């Protein structure tokens, strides 16, 4: 009986199986992320500088590790199995870094249980040795794909290009990405070379795919523009967690530079401003093949409504004790807010740029110095009205740069200004803030092709055109004098060089104190052709 019925029943059953719709399994992960924290261990003001205890008590402050710990804990309660990653530049920006280097960041990031981080350019500010010490102290991978460290013994064999982490049974590939011009932005040393981000990321994606990893996140400290390029040109990247450009992406904030996430094909690009003011929270759904089917989220504002974790508050207070005497000292007064926002200072004349450049020139004017050029990337914060503390000054100028003086031809000055306006569209830190000169530039002209249309030199109470054949005395900071931010002419075409003047932060504090209360100014020394 069975033998006669089996051929009839079996085809019917198989037919049912073959015609049933295939169910595609999906998996969802939450990516929590930070970037460009810049050693803002304590809460910051709306100007990204130090926030007073009184204002913090009144709920006027943002960020700080104590609030971030609370925000991350709350996000993990909502999203069990979430990963926490960082887009680079934990280093540099406050006395906590100046005094402790990477030790405080390592301790706090371990407490927060980060899952991965990319190397930012500022992680190289004190060379590979400090970065290596940080890496040895953290319990998560630190990555950088687009650099060759094989000739740098401190990092060779230790700093990986990519890694695989596992959360709730899901294997996720992480790839690090660092600015291609890090050798101009920081101090990685001569043993490390940096390369094209697109090729580097594609190579790591392919290597991970060979291991069966089809969910891939790039941790990119390369800027929003580069992230969009990588997303459009690299096959196989699902999420890019950005940094470097301090870009706020949001679906609700009118100041956002783009939506959160910004979708480029099937790749979700996110970034969460800077200084611990936001915690990015992205929910990503994948199909079985690792393709993103849905990506939604919004950066969470870490404001006064987020409670500070008491244990972290106590630990930060302990760490702050050696710093308090320095940073709480009132050094001057200002009559109004001094604007130092990077989005302003990196594209045009700004109040803080004028202040810093004027202070530099005033300090060495009796030494035959004619003009000052300050890279806007060295200006890191605004200053609020009223009392100015040394801590606020150090928030503006955190790099311990010294004044550097030299002589160069007028043609060299012109080349320097051309370099300064060559990357305005990318909001790069090489934009020049100046004193002793005025200049006009034209954005419609290609970079390096004569964007600088006029340069006038101070001549007593008058102004006269820059003479390309004349020799001028220039003051800048030692980083720029050494060729940083693309100012290579200052490293090679100069005479009578002296790099060991007073610290720039002391110069600024003294200048502010000499004319208090200081009144911020804009006087048209930089103008754009319309």
Image: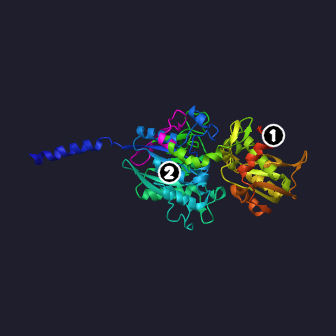
Q: Along the horizontal axis of the image, is 140 left or right of 365?
A: left
Graded by Cα atoms within 10 Å as few (under 14), some (14 to 19) or many (20 or more), the crowding at tag 1 reads few
- Which quarter shows the N terminus? top left
Which residues fall within the magenta stretch? Answer: 284-313
The residue that appears at 49% across and 56% down in the rendered structure is 137
Q: Which mark is residue 107?
A: 2
Q: Toward the viewer: 399 or 438? A: 399
Residue 194 appears in the picture as rendered: no
Q: Toward the viewer: 447 or 487? A: 487
Check if residue 98 falls in the magenta segment. Answer: no
Residue extending furthest toward the left: 1
Q: Secondary structure at mark 2?
A: helix
Q: Nearer the viewer, mark 1 or mark 2?
A: 2
Q: Secondary structure at mark 1?
A: loop
The residue that appears at 17% across and 43% down in the rendered structure is 9
Number of numbered discs on residues: 2
The residue that appears at 91% across and 45% down in the rendered structure is 462
Check if residue 300 falls in the magenta segment. Answer: yes
- Which quarter shows the C terminus? top right
* Residue 282, horizontal then vertical, whole percent: 48, 41
Residue identified by numbered label 1: 523
* Residue 92, horizontal then vertical, whole percent: 61, 51
The answer to which of marks 1 and 2 sits earlier in the sequence is 2
Name the quadrant containing residue 470: bottom right
Looking at the image, residue 238 lies above or below residue 145: above
Measured in 3D between alpha carbons, the distance from the residue under mark 1 to the one under mark 2, in whole angstroms, is 45 Å
Residue 404 appears in the picture as rendered: yes
Q: Toward the viewer: 143 or 257? A: 143
């Amino acid at each position: 009986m069975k033998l006669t019925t089996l051929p009839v029943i079996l085809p019917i059953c198989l037919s049912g199986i073959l015609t049933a719709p295939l169910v595609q399994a999906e998996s969802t992960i939450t990516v929590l992320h930070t970037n460009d924290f810049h050693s803002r261990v304590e809460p910051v003001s709306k100007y990204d500088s130090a926030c007073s205890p009184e204002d913090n008590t009144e709920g006027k402050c943002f960020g700080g590790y104590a609030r971030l710990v609370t925000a991350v804990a709350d996000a993990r309660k909502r999203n069990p199995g979430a990963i926490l990653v960082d887009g680079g530049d934990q280093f540099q920006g406050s006395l906590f870094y100046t005094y402790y280097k990477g030790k405080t960041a390592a301790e706090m990031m371990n407490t927060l249980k980060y899952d991965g981080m990319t190397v930012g350019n500022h992680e190289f500010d004190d060379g590979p040795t400090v970065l290596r010490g940080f890496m040895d102290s953290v319990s998560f991978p630190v990555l950088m794909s687009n650099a060759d460290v094989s000739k740098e013994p401190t990092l060779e064999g230790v700093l990986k290009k990519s890694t695989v982490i596992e959360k709730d049974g899901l294997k996720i590939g992480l790839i690090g990405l660092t600015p291609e011009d890090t050798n101009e932005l920081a101090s990685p040393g001569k043993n490390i070379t940096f390369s094209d981000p697109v090729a580097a990321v594609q190579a790591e994606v392919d290597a991970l795919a060979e291991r069966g990893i089809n969910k891939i996140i790039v941790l990119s400290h390369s800027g929003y523009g580069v992230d969009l390029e990588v997303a459009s040109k690299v096959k196989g990247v699902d999420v890019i967690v950005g940094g470097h450009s301090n870009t706020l992406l949001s679906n609700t904030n009118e100041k956002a530079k783009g939506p959160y996430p910004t979708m480029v094909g099937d790749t979700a690009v996110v970034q969460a401003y800077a200084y611990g003011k936001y915690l990015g929270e992205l929910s990503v759904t994948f199909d079985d093949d690792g393709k993103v089917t849905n990506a939604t989220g919004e950066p969470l504002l870490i404001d006064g409504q987020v409670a500070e974790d008491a244990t972290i508050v106590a630990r930060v207070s302990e760490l702050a004790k050696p710093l308090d005497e320095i940073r709480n000292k009132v050094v001057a007064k200002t009559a109004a807010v001094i604007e130092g926002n990077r989005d302003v200072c990196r594209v045009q004349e700004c109040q803080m740029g004028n202040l810093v450049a004027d202070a530099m020139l005033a300090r060495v004017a009796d030494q035959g110095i004619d003009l000052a050029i300050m890279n806007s990337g060295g200006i890191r914060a605004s200053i609020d009205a009223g009392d100015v503390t040394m801590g606020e000054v150090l928030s503006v100028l955190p790099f311990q740069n010294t004044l550097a003086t030299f002589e160069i031809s007028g043609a060299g000055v012109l080349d320097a200004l051309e370099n300064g306006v060559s990357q305005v569209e990318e909001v790069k830190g090489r934009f020049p803030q100046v004193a002793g000169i005025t200049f006009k530039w034209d954005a419609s002209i290609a970079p390096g092709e004569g964007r600088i249309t006029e340069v006038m030199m101070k001549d007593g109470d008058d102004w006269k055109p820059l003479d390309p054949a004349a020799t001028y005395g220039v003051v800048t900071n030692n980083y720029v004098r050494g060729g940083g931010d693309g100012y290579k002419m200052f490293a090679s075409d100069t005479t009578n060089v002296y790099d060991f003047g007073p610290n720039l932060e002391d110069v600024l504090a003294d200048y502010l104190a000499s004319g208090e209360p200081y009144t911020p100014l804009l006087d048209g020394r930089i103008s754009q052709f319309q």
